[in-house]
Image (cartoon, rainbow, N blue to C red):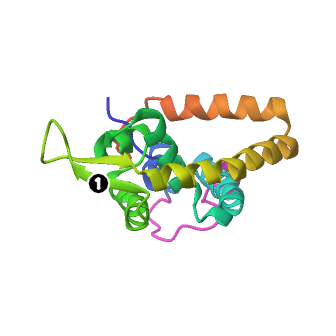
Amino acid sequence: MPRFGLDIMRICAQLRVGTAKVKEEKVVTSDALPRLEECTCLAVRQAARHVTQFYDRHLAPVGLRTTQFSILARLRRHGAMTINALAEEMVMDRTTLGRNILPLERDGLISIKPGRTDRRSKELRLTNSGLERLRAGFQGWKDAQREFATAFGNERTVGLRALLHEVAATNLPLEAAAAG
């Protein structure tokens, strides 16, 4: 089953957030709108941006961003992967992944070659330079992990990771329910 990223409009439509019905009036007053604190998607995205910025600061000294570090780590762990397989593994769409792999290829950290079994597909491989950069970033990542756990609490951090893995694995409907 294909995995997909969270789309704020799709989720809010599914939750019927922001689709307040006002009889015969086309203007929606602020009283009819849901409170922003009630939007799960907004809360998840804000937390994700906050944590990503924190990890980015730890990886910046070696010239990596969090997503780039994750891509290099996945390629190290799994070996050569097609773009589609990596996108699915990272719960990312191909376009977003494409934007993230371009600087890695430009800097010689990954190579992109035709697939071994299907020449039309593209396979990503970690280069020796990429492995060196991944190893250089590992200490920043470990520091970020430790500092986050210290600030948020070790037990809560473990629980948060487990909960987020469950969220990512949840089979959410692909189509928003028809408003009616």
Neighbourhood count class around disc 1 (C-alpha, 10 Å): few under 14, some 14–19, many 20 upward: some
Query: What quarter of the picture does the N terminus occupy?
Result: top left
93 sits to left or right of 12: left
In the depicted structure, whether residue 62 falls above or below residue 127: below
Q: Residue furthest front?
A: 128
Q: What residue appears at the point 20 percent right and 43 percent down from the top-left corner?
A: 115
32 within the magenta span? yes
Q: Position of residue 143 (x, y in %)?
A: 77, 48
99 within the magenta span? no
65 sits to left or right of 92: right
Q: Quadrant of residue 104?
A: bottom left
Q: What residue appears at the point 71 percent right and 49 percent down from the top-left corner?
A: 139
Q: Residue furthest bottom?
A: 27
Q: Position of residue 10 (x, y in %)?
A: 42, 50
Q: Position of residue 81 (x, y in %)?
A: 33, 40
Q: What residue appears at the point 23 percent right and 51 percent down from the top-left corner?
A: 113
Q: Which residues are magenta?
A: 22-39
Residue 116 in view in this figure:
yes
Q: Quadrant of residue 96?
A: bottom left
Q: Main secondary structure of the magenta part?
A: loop
- Looking at this view, is 151 or 144 the one in front? 144
Circle 1 is placed at which residue position? 112
Q: Position of residue 165 (x, y in %)?
A: 57, 31
Residue 8 in view in this figure:
no
Query: What quarter of the picture does the C terminus occupy?
Result: top left
Q: Quadrant of residue 99?
A: bottom left
Tell me which amino acid carries mark 1. Answer: Ile
- Looking at this view, is 115 or 93 the one in front? 115
